[in-house]
Image (cartoon, grey):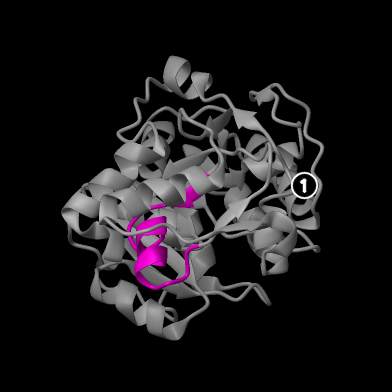
Amino acid sequence: MPFTTSEPHSDADDTREAPQMRLVCLGFGYSANALVELLDTRRIDVTGTTRDPEKADSLHRRSIRTVLFDGSKPSPALADAIRHATHIVVSAGPSEQGDPFLWHHERDIVNAEGLKGVAYLSTIGVYGNHEGALIDERTSCIPTTERAMWRLAAEDAWMACGSRAGAPVSLLRLAGIYGPGRNQLKQLAEGKAKRIIKPGQIFNRIHVDDIARVIERVLERPASRIYNVADNKPCPPQEVVEYAAELMGVEPPPEVPFEEANLSPMARTFYGDVKRVSNRRLHDELGVRLEYPTYREGLKALWETGRWKG
């Protein structure tokens, strides 16, 4: 039975075999898309939210139930999907006022009788600036930007909601995301790549396909835990651009001192914190082995398969 933004789901009308998982993706973005591509969709029922009517139509054509949700008011269709959910993945970011899904649907989440677990996609930005020191999940969070402060508050709110719902909430703190259509190879091809030099600057990255694998694992093994989802090689950003240029057989863009770089306020925040992130808990507790443990494996695979174009 197709799902629309106006029709609630009816168990009585569904003659298919009951799916083993009813997954609700609150914010169907880049990482949620990679997750659904990884999962066996014959065994799951997926609902995703979006603000964009055109994207909703596109998801619907892929047999993904779609709910238009802009955060301004509750959605009966979303309430119904949450009521039937076995798992929830949250990838939409909060605002200064908090998380819009919790504003309008926290009661639905708490009352979802079949809910087994929640995966909340956060950011390593909540740790703040640790001057290049190695950090793990026990490190104190000292966020340096408003967005990171909002994320940290949203983490707490979701953990509290999960406690009330009796469902574990896994907090996945993601490093800088790259993958198909979002990578230095594409930036070089479009003439948008920048080789910005800021002495001492290092940070981690993570391929979106590895994010999907981590989400899959925490949905299989729900636990109220924090996991750093990052690669094995924090490094300066210019190093990644140089390797991408090497793969393509082109000259890298000229070096630009950070002080002279023409960056958006958002892009500039990525250079504000310096930290090296440990992903040991990811390996030791979840048993995850990254397919792309460094940017070199990730970019090489994107280049050789042509997936870098998106």
Observer able to see residue 161:
no
Query: Where is residue 287 drawn, in percent x and y?
Result: 37, 20
Q: Is residue 175 above or below residue 266?
A: above
Residue shown at 45% from the left, 15% from the top = 284
Query: Where is residue 105 drawn, in percent x and y?
Result: 63, 60
Query: Where is residue 169 drawn, in percent x and y?
Result: 58, 36
- Residue 184 inside the magenta-drawn segment: yes
Residue on which the image places disc 1: 153
Query: Where is residue 10 drawn, in percent x and y?
Result: 35, 66
In the rendered image, the residue lying farthest to the bottom is 54
Residue shown at 32% from the left, 47% from the top = 299
Residue shown at 51% from the left, 42% from the top = 119
Would residue 214 be found to the left or right of residue 255 on screen? left
* Occupied quadrant, residue 158: top right
Question: Which kind of residue does numbered mark 1 sit on?
Answer: Ala
* Occupied quadrant, residue 142: top right
Q: Give the quadrant of the N terminus.
A: bottom left
- Front residue of 133/290: it is 133
Give the magenta range.
176-193
Observer able to see residue 290:
yes
Residue shown at 44% from the left, 51% from the top = 241
Would residue 94 be found to the left or right of residue 45 on screen? right
- Front residue of 86/262: it is 262
Would residue 7 be found to the left or right of residue 195 on screen? left
